[in-house]
Image (cartoon, rainbow, N blue to C red):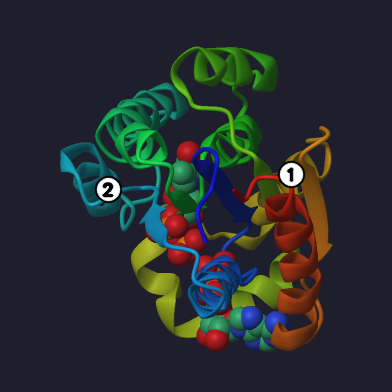
């Protein structure tokens, strides 16, 4: 299927909420209907993303401002190198985390959320659809029990409780809060309905 223009679909939510699972399910559902999609994630595999991942095992190794700076640099690179070229080719882009994560995660470390939003609206491509997967912090952490050790910087429960609250405050026309405390299939079904209804208006 051909699209009139590129489409950017973003998955957000706390760690363990099921973003990667749902992004992957959508990717396959799109391929089945002959939509070509590309998949990116933040933090990226690029130089800034690698620095972020190295630091993630050491809590308090970065100040909130230093963290913000690294995520912003990584995002600028992702927007220019990955997102814009794919969208220009009228591809469908699935993105696992974007600037809503910065609003929620760096916001939960005390940085003003409006400031983060404004910084990002300057550099980011606006997404078509944003799915924020909503799940209790403890349930999210239980799902990723074996991953916990390497991400100490981001995965403490009390912190994720605050991150979740900030995600819940993010609203907009194209932003969907999805109850992630359901089966993988139920969640996929809801997301697919929204995506295919949206794409119907954009196919040639
Ligand atoms: P995230 O990308 O948000 O960190 P993942 O998609 O990696 O989350 O999922 C974290 C873990 O939870 C994985 O082991 C995955 O198989 C499992 N999982 C994903 N969705 C669900 C669900 N709806 N119910 C229960 N477990 C799930
Ligand atoms: P990620 O590798 O996506 O972890 P996960 O698979 O557990 O979701 O992201 C690593 C961490 O980076 C994650 O805990 C959230 C955090 N993060 C921020 O704090 N700010 C941001 O802007 C982004 C994109 C991620």
Name the foreground residue: 2 vs 49: 2
Name the foreground residue: 33 vs 152: 33
Q: Is residue 110 above or below residue 114?
A: below
Residue 9 in view: yes
Q: Which mark is residue 89?
A: none
Apparent side of residue 161 relative to residue 119 in the rendered image (left or right): right
Q: Residue 120: percent from the left, percent from the top?
A: 52, 20
Q: Is residue 101 above or below residue 148?
A: above
Residue under label 1, please give it. Answer: 167
Q: At x 35% / y 42%, what residue is drawn?
A: 86
Q: At x 33% / y 26%, what residue is drawn?
A: 76
Earlier residue among tags 2 and 1? 2
Residue under label 2, please give it. Answer: 55
For residue 173, which quarter of the picture?
A: top right
User: 10 Å neighbourhood of mark 1: few (<14), some, or many (≥20)?
Assistant: many
Name the foreground residue: 49 vs 60: 49
Q: Residue 121: percent from the left, percent from the top?
A: 56, 17
Q: Are marks 2 and 1 in contact (CB under 8 Å)?
A: no
Q: Is residue 55 above or below residue 124?
A: below
Q: Residue 16: percent from the left, percent from the top?
A: 59, 71
Furthest toward the front, the residue is: 204
For residue 14, which quarter of the picture?
A: bottom right
Apparent side of residue 144 relative to residue 39 in the rendered image (left or right): right
Furthest toward the left, the residue is: 47
């Amino acid at each position: 299927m051909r699209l009139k223009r590129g489409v950017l679909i973003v998955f957000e939510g706390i760690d363990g909420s099921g973003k990667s699972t749902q992004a992957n399910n959508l990717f396959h559902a799109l391929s089945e209907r002959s939509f070509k999609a590309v998949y990116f994630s933040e933090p990226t595999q690029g130089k800034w993303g690698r620095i972020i991942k190295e630091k993630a095992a050491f809590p308090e190794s970065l100040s909130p401002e230093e963290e913000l700076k690294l995520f912003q640099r990584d995002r600028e690179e992702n927007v220019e190198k990955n997102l814009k070229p794919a969208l220009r080719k009228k591809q469908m882009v699935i993105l696992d985390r974007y600037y809503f994560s910065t609003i929620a995660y760096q916001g939960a470390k005390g940085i003003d959320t409006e400031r983060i939003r404004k910084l990002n609206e300057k550099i980011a491509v606006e997404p078509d659809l944003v799915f924020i997967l909503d799940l209790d912090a403890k349930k999210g952490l239980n799902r990723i029990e074996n991953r916990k050790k390497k991400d100490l910087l981001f995965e403490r429960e009390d912190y994720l409780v605050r991150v979740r609250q900030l995600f819940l405050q993010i609203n907009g026309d194209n932003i969907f809060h999805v109850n992630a405390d359901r089966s993988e299939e139920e969640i996929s079904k809801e997301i697919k309905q929204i995506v295919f209804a949206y794409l119907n208006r954009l196919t040639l």
